[in-house]
Each structure stands twice: as C-alpha cells, then as structure tokens.
Image: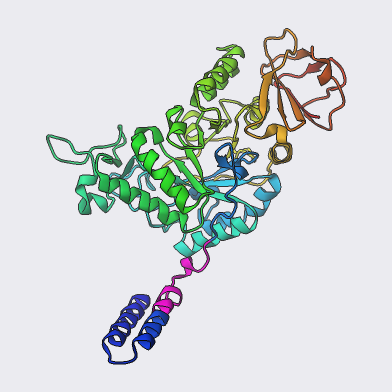
Amino acid sequence: MAIRMHNVYFVHIILSLVTQKINHMRRLLLAAALLGLMATGCKTATETKTAYTTDTTRVDGHPAWIMQGNIYEVNVRQYTPEGTFKAFTTHLSRLKDMGVHTLWFMPIQPISKVDRKGVLGSYYAISNYTAINSEYGTPDDWQELVNTAHDLGFKVIIDWVPNHTGADHYWLEKYPDFYVRDSATGKAKYAFDWSDTRDLNYDNPVLVDTMINAMKFWLRTGIDGFRCDVAGEVPNTFWVKAIPELKKANPGIFMLAENNDAKMHQAGFDATYPWSEFSIMKKIVKGELPLTSLDSEQAKLSTYPANALRMYFTSNHDENSWNKADYATMPGAVHAPFAVLTQTWARSVPLIYSGQEEPFLDSISFFYKDTITFGNYERAPFYKLLLNLRATNKALAANAAYARVDAGSPAQVYAYVREKDGAKVLVVLNLSDKAATVTLADASLVKKPATLLASGTVDPEKASYQLEPWGYAVYAY
C-alpha cells in the first residue's frame, strides 16, 4: 500500500510540474528525476536483484551450458519437513558437491481449492500463474533462492502448465473466453479426465499473448528456462510464437517439452521426453524385450532434427508417484546400469529426481504431505562420479558422436562409444541378472583408460572380461 501511495504522490507532483509556469527544461529534468525515483526507490524486494542468464552462447542451437549439464527435479512440497524454499536452500551445497547443474522446480504457483484432489491438491492445478504458493514461502523467498542458486553456479528452470488451469483460476471469471466450453452447459471443460483442472482455449489470441506475458514475468526473476507440462496438447502454433519471444527476453534460456514428438523440436524446444525409450528400459528389466529394442529407438531419432536433445531418466515425479519408479521398476542393483545409460547415451540430458540419491525407496504422494527422508545419500558418490565425468569430458556432451560397439555374443551386453574433439568414452552395460563375458573386437578400445567407473572388478586392458549381473564399466580415454 505504501508503494502505491508513494507512486500516486509522485505522479501528482509530476503533473503539477508540467502545468506550472516554470522553465520548460527545468520542468522536464525534475519530472525525469521523480520518474527515476518511482522506477528505483519504489521497487519491491523481489525486484532489487534480478539474476538474468548472462551466458547466451549457443551450441547446435541450444544454450551451451546444457550440453554437458544435467537436471535435478525438485519437489519443494515433499523435499523437507517444512516444504519451503528456505528449507530447500539448505540442500544446495550438497547438491552442488554431487555435481547437480540445473534445478527444475515443480510448479511454484498457488493451487486451486475448487475440486481440489486430496488435502493439498495437484501441483498442476494452478490458480494464478504470476503468484507464489504461500505454502512454499514468499516472492522474496523465491527470489532469494534463485539468486543463491545462481551464486553457487546452478541454473534454474521452472515447471510451466500451459494446457490448463486449476478450477478456480481468476481467469474463469475475468476472461471466460480463455476456456474451452461445453456446448450444452456453457461450463469450462476439464482437461482430459482431470476434474480439478479447466482446459484453455488457444484459439483465443488474447489468451496466447497473456500466457506469453505470464512466462516473461518469471523470466524477470532470473530463471533460465521452462519445463513445459503436457506441451504437445498445446497447439504448436503457440510454441512457434512463444519461444522466439521468450528467447528475445532472455537469449540463454533452455526449453524442455514433456512430449515424445519430433514436432516439439521443430517448434523450438531444446529437449523432449523419451517416453518410448523409458518404456523399453522397464520391459528389458522384466525380460520382455531384447536390448536391440534400444537400438530401434535410437534409429527413430533420425526422424528428429539433427540437434534434438532428449532428457533421459530412471524416475521423475509422475513415474515415482504412479508407477513405483525407480525403487520397483529398477530395484536394487538394476538401477545403476540404467542410470549410466541415461547419463551417457546419445543426445542425452540426464535427469535425477528428488530423493534418488538417498535412495528414497517409496512413492511420493501427489496430493498429500509425504516428506522424503534424507540422511544416508548412498547413491550420491555414484552420481557424483557420473555427473562430474559428464561435465568434464567432451565425449559425453549431448552432441558428441555415438556408435554401438561389438562386445561379443552375450545378448544382455549393451556397449557403445561416444567421441568428440579427440576425447573418447566407452560404455559397457550388462542389462541382465546374469554375469556376462565381454569380448571387445576393437583393439583400440583395449588399453588403459584415463578414467574408469565400474561395478565389481574389471580389467580394461584385457579384450575379454566378466561383468557382474547388472554391472557396468565406463572407460574414458
């Protein structure tokens, strides 16, 4: 209220100056000075420091910083007993030590109360796109978190939910034509069968511009991009318009689409979800598909733009909450070789979900408070080795060359080489519950590597060696 009163007071003075019979130049100078005070002295705390992305270098059309980076998905509600931005901030130093590079925050906006599911509702039923969920903290708390993360070298992206709002978003009253309406009742329709949401109407050009402006609002807090929920359900014409406008506002941003389709890359997204590949991984664990199914999926990428990136994962909030990933889909020792795959595969930008480094061996509730228990961090050293190797070795850059390697006859061994600018990495995975004998036909790969990550004991200078069940070996030359 004080800020508004001050602004009104300043405007009154400016108008008075303009109408007074004093020297024209002096009037302009005084008015300009007062406008300057309005622009600087009356800022809220959240506006005092804006940490825009300064690195706008692009590689293959993408922000250079993502090419050897990684993503860590943050579930603020469940991350700490408090479930706040401030409480999460205490974990930043250990995540930095583990090698985490980009923090993806699940939706940080307030959640609708009408038709709410469970006690706390779905993160993805938003009631106001440009507000902060008070359960997590204040706008100042968010800005402090972004600034602290940037100071530590992290990038920050937020979840964006453009396809639908919650059931009591203020747009429903103020802009009813922003929504898809039932022809019989005139009521706003659900998105899919999600009764706590209302479907947005992208045939309305005013909605399109309003949505883009809402995204720009968050760019002003200094974030480095967006993960866009069910992005393929929003017309591609929206993304074709929105993404260039967002990149004008901040040329260094990263755009991730929750969608498996090549069209998202054509619309301007940097990376997409590999839902098909993840489904195949789970079936390989069950023995339902051969490893060659992975090759088939890689071959399909030839239909994508040559620079398309993929966010590979062994778990995320959906797969954990609804499908028991990764504690049941890739249990125990099974997790490790697939985690290596996600970190080293062609075109990969790898993801780690909240609690996987513990590991937290349970589903995390979607609509209720269900705090992740941290304390042991048993996988943290494993992830640290992988993340740091990826960050420092050009052969693991997302755009490094990829080629399958002959590792002998065992059907359960999956091997490949990544190369870039003279750096080379060999990855050998035993994706089965039986020990495997690896036989490398390429003599150039049988030599002492500069770096070795492996389960069990292997000798990289031998052309033939054993890999334990669900074993892996990563050689960096």
Residue found at the very far front of the displayed protein: 24
Depth check: give the residue in front, 447 or 56: 56
Residue 138 in view in this figure: no
Apparent side of residue 186 relative to residue 126 in the rendered image (left or right): left
Q: How far across and how far down the image is residue 447, in percent?
A: 86, 23
Residue at image position (46%, 28%) is 260
Quadrant for the C terminus, please. Answer: top right
Q: Which residues are magenta?
A: 35-50
Q: Is residue 332 above or below residue 48?
A: above
Q: Is residue 200 above or below residue 132?
A: above
Residue at image position (26%, 45%) is 205
In the rendered image, which quarter is residue 149 located in?
Answer: bottom right
Quadrant for the N terminus, please. Answer: bottom left
Q: How far across and how far down the image is residue 410, in percent?
A: 71, 9
Q: Quick check: is 36 in the magenta stretch?
A: yes
Q: Is residue 439 above or below residue 318?
A: above
Residue found at the very far bottom of the displayed protein: 22
Q: Is residue 183 above or below residue 372?
A: above
Depth check: give the residue in front, 254 or 375: 254
Q: How far across and how far down the image is residue 25, in percent?
A: 37, 86
